[in-house]
Image (cartoon, grey):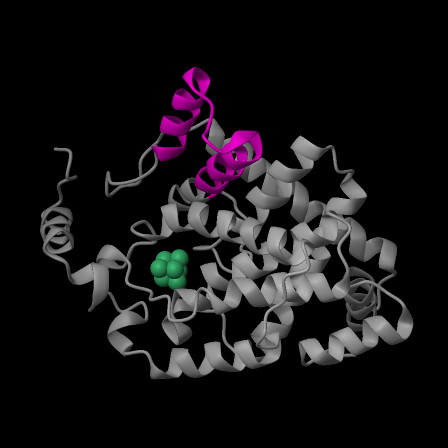
Amino acid sequence: MTVLSFSELEIKCNNACKSIYEIAQENESVLSGDDVDVIRLRVLEDLLAMKDAIKNGLGSKEKAVSGWCGDDCAKLIEKYKIKPALFGKIFEKITIYALATAEENLRMGRIVACPTAGSCGIVPSVITAVSEEQKIPESEQINGLLTAGMIGLIISNKVQLAGAVAGCQAECGVASAMAAGALVQMSGGSTKEILNAAALVLKNILGLTCDPVCGLVEVPCIKRNAFLAIHAVVAAELALCGVESKIPIDEIVDTLKITGQLMSPLLKETSLGGLAKTHTAMKLEKKLYAGKSIHS
Ligand code: SF4
């Protein structure tokens, strides 16, 4: 019961009068041989693990061995105690939670790769922040996460979700599309709106390079999680207002794959180009490998 494309998924949903999450859980049930209830319990475990990662990240300022990152989330928490975020509580929480999770990843804490470890803050921050602020029940959050999973699964049928293969468009970009779909689902949107939200995200991240400084999943990865979580919210808002992507999502995924193939290997996780080869990155690299933190 593999669903290979978004157009196929939309037809299945329309013919069966089902939502994407219902098709996703039935799909998983057929593949695993477990009941849908068991599948939903497993998704709940993932959801709770995501929330644990957020909680752990919120409680730590510990920096990575490099000394570069690990305390940005704490800076936001302190600032927002005095002055709220410009764009309200949901923006505040999404940004903080995305950083909290990504910083947990750099400390080698337990996170849920969704779809990858480098992009682990995007889906959890959007689902958790919005459900806390809008009092969305757990069952609806599970529906959102199943929807996100289905979006990631279909994209991964065509493109390997790895910066080394297709750049960060295939990691943080895909995570953002997954989060947008989850948000539209949790907001009561239709299948068409979910797919439009994911399409709008993907169109706007095409060509996003993977050029981590010193090959560490820190710069630019940590902050990128916060940016692309908010990117998902913009796409969900547009889709829920009836804005449509003129290019169908399947064609955008094909374009993402081709764009990844056209990208120079220097910009695909090799740290041989882009930000990784800036003057400052070279200085950081020198200090790091001299055994010193840049703060020493
Ligand atoms: S820049 Fe590269 S390593 Fe960092 S999150 Fe994106 S794909 Fe992953």
Identify the residue shown where x is 28% and y is 71%: 267
Q: Inspect the magenta stretch and tell me whether residue 1 lies in it.
A: no
Write down the quadrant of residue 33 in the picture: bottom right
**Nearer to us in this view, 160 or 198:** 198
Identify the residue shown where x is 79% and y is 70%: 27
Residue 129 in percent (x, y) is at: 60, 37
Give the side of residue 173 with respect to residue 22, left or right.
Answer: left
Quadrant of the snapshot with the N terminus: bottom right
Residue 56 in percent (x, y) is at: 51, 32
Write down the quadrant of residue 166 in the picture: bottom left
Residue closest to the far top? 82
| 82 is higher (above) or lower (below) than 142 | above
Identify the residue shown where x is 34% and y is 53%: 217
| 11 is higher (above) or lower (below) than 245 | below
Quadrant of the snapshot with the C terminus: top left
Q: Inspect the magenta stretch and tell me whether residue 75 lies in it.
A: yes
Q: Which residues are magenta?
A: 72-101
If the picture is divided into quarters, which one holds ligand 1?
A: bottom left
Give the side of residue 241 with respect to residue 121, left or right.
Answer: right
Residue 193 in percent (x, y) is at: 70, 62
| 37 is higher (above) or lower (below) than 65 | below
Observer able to see residue 131 = yes
**Nearer to us in this view, 155 or 44:** 155
Q: Main secondary structure of the magenta part?
A: helix
